[in-house]
Image (spheres, coloured by chain):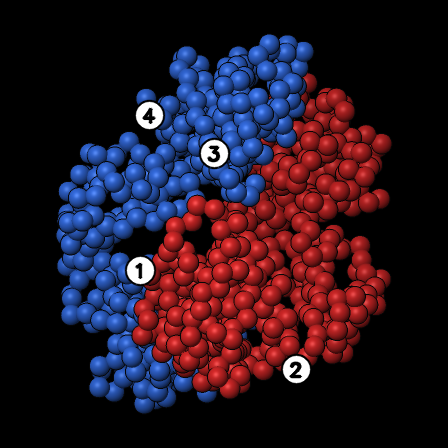
Chain colours: A blue, B red
Amino acid sequence: MIAEMVFVGTELLLGQIVNTNAAYLGERLSELGIDHYYQSVVGDNAKRLAGVLNLAVSRSDVVIACGGLGPTLDDLTRETVAELTGRELEFNDEIWQTIRRRRPNLPENMKRQAMVPKGAKVLPNDTGTAPGLAVPDQSDNKLFILLPGPPNEMKPMFDKYAVPVLLERMGERAVLVSRSLHFCEIGESPLEDRLMDLFAGQVDPTLATYAKPGHVQLRISTKAHTREEGLAKIAPVEEEIRRRVGEYIYGVDGTTLEEAVGELLLGRNWRVFIADAGTGGILASRLTDPPGANAWFAGALVAASTTQLVQMIMAEEQPGAGTGSEVGNGAAASEALAMDLAKHLLARMDGVSVGISILPAAPGEAVVALATAAGDTRTALAQWRGNTQDYRWRVSQAALGALRRLAMA
Amino acid sequence: MIAEMVFVGTELLLGQIVNTNAAYLGERLSELGIDHYYQSVVGDNAKRLAGVLNLAVSRSDVVIACGGLGPTLDDLTRETVAELTGRELEFNDEIWQTIRRRRPNLPENMKRQAMVPKGAKVLPNDTGTAPGLAVPDQSDNKLFILLPGPPNEMKPMFDKYAVPVLLERMGERAVLVSRSLHFCEIGESPLEDRLMDLFAGQVDPTLATYAKPGHVQLRISTKAHTREEGLAKIAPVEEEIRRRVGEYIYGVDGTTLEEAVGELLLGRNWRVFIADAGTGGILASRLTDPPGANAWFAGALVAASTTQLVQMIMAEEQPGAGTGSEVGNGAAASEALAMDLAKHLLARMDGVSVGISILPAAPGEAVVALATAAGDTRTALAQWRGNTQDYRWRVSQAALGALRRLAMA
């Protein structure tokens, strides 16, 4: 089956919004095993929209159109597709009542959103008002799937309501089941190397890796009659992957590294204090992001340089090692000082189980030192040439990775 | 003149990257006054790429194609456009030498990047290897502009080398000149209200606002024979805007709010210390982002709650007001406590000229208090319903806005 995407909206052409829906749907289609060769963007213009949709349906089996389902006059997708498929629009009171239950004071012009081409299937909108539609052509050879433009409405609707329609149309009474494994402290290439035979031999389930900033995602996908059956097919593959590289897997599906680390800290009843001259506070912001961070986050000192950080922490005590040292003293000296500071945090602050310090070691390079109240230590070196924001993110990623190791030990 | 964009790359179809180039070019074309009705995305497939380019050139005067200019075999744009325009590819030694000067150990297959369709204009690549190309069709009625896919190569090349080609083609021996003004502490609607007559009457220069997270951008654009002439046309419009709403303008063109604030702090020789239970460290990360932050950033304490922050700062001294208070005590109580803390920072830390404290006041609401060593104070309330990251960003935006006001006073 060949699908094609059409994105509708003048704001896309003008560059007022970035089309993130395209990447989302692209990933999904490839997981579903649906080929897709073209995407088009067109403005809110009836003639041009009809032209683009016509071309798309001439060369593809399924056309997924995003946007233009709203209540205003320049929302044209519903009407245009009704005309292309020769289907009359009917008012659907059930949709209207659902919309009104959610938003009681709606103006009457919102009624357009309750119009449905005769014979189309309604795709409920659990997070907004305009429902989606699956509209077959007269011969039922081709299908238009209309989705709303806002990503927070489009994504759940696609996953929950459009995917089953697509799978049924592929002749598969199947559901798509996938698990995403998230890896830290290992790059995409070494990961693929360790799993090479699994990648080479993959048929069902399929495997795909995605390199993200500072982490790698591996998605295992399969089609099955039920979600349970799918998960049962995925389980042995996941097990084999975990057997080989499980130590690097910090979470599954939507889990972030900070959530995974927070969970581990909670389990150990650990509280972390950070002395940070390396990420400008990014590590603190990540560790305080998950709900309940109060339990594991004891606080952070953020400084713009090693000197400043040492002054903040040590006050008059001044350790010998590297006081006054700045970027350029090299990794070894920075590492020794960082470990001093991490240990110092344990002694100085009440109720701290882990001290973390981060110091710049060289341009684009930072050392992370961790020390626990029980006497365990760990260090990590983070390197990244790029802009400040990417660099800091990756340093915080290295610190979280090291903290995770320590909490797992 | 009508332009159209074609984006080339299977990684776009698969959703491995988000197409941010589309939004960038969309903004630029609309500033240039060039109409554009369609965008297409197509994979690295010769036949389909030729089909998409053919369609594009049939309905537009200029086709801007991004991507597929690299050295590998699946980079097909150069060859495909040469064939479509009936122009032979010639090896251009000057390009090859330029590429080799930048990267001396290049393999021979990189030579493809030095192939130029006969009669095409080369658009230099100041930030990468593959140059861009402006390739007219045989009758010189239509033009293909080929740009590299990586945004850090595409954007400067488009602005510096493709824009002049486009303007010349529009029959205007002109350059596009624009100034972007950045506003904080004012929303898009109130800003447009205060400038309504300027927007209504605009012909040349043109005005356009863009709402960004926590700030508004206003771009003034014009075409002129020279950059100086353009700036002279923009100056009186900018002056009138500044007369009305100048107090909200924190910077021009690429300036960030943290850079603008850093500059002001530097000018006043102020050093800022932050006590932060509201942004999880984001404010510190922004204030330490510009180079030279050492001069104005004295450090930060980051906590996960008001209680924790108070404990960190006050140690045994415990102020009466709100010790032990958490989210929910309301804005007034939080504001009083925040001001206590801000003043306390001044007293407690050496060489601090401004103390800033940020406390949560209610769900989705934070108070910011600022106090200077000279006795000036300022407070701000930030509200945002959304995910944690957006919320924290906007709270940090409010804090920087208030700090800016204080530093300007």
Precedes in sequence: disc 1 or disc 4: 1
Chain of the residue under the numbered disc 2 shown in the image: B
Question: What is the distance, in whole Å, between disc 2 and disc 4 at their CAs?
Answer: 68 Å
Relative side of B186 to B45, left or right: right
Q: Secondary structure at mark 3?
A: strand
- Crowd rating for badge 3 (residues with CA inside 10 Å; few <14, some 14–19, many 20+): some
Which picture quadrant has residue B225?
bottom right
| Front disc: 4 or 3 | 3
| Front disc: 2 or 4 | 2
Q: Is residue B257 above or below residue A239?
A: below
Q: Which residue is mark 2?
A: B171
Q: Which residue is mark 1?
A: A28
Numbered disc total: 4
Question: What is the distance, in whole Å, between disc 1 and disc 4 at their CAs?
Answer: 33 Å
Q: Secondary structure at mark 2?
A: loop
Circles 3 and 2 on the same subunit = no
The label number, if any, that marks residue A408 in the structure image: 4
Question: What is the distance, in whole Å, between disc 1 and disc 2 at their CAs?
Answer: 45 Å
What amino acid type is highlighted by mark number 1? Arg
Q: Which residue is mark 3?
A: A383
What amino acid type is highlighted by mark number 4? Met
Residue ID at (15%, 42%): A236
| Front disc: 3 or 2 | 2
| Front disc: 3 or 1 | 3
Precedes in sequence: disc 4 or disc 3: 3
The picture places residue B9, in percent across and down from the top left corner, at: 38, 63
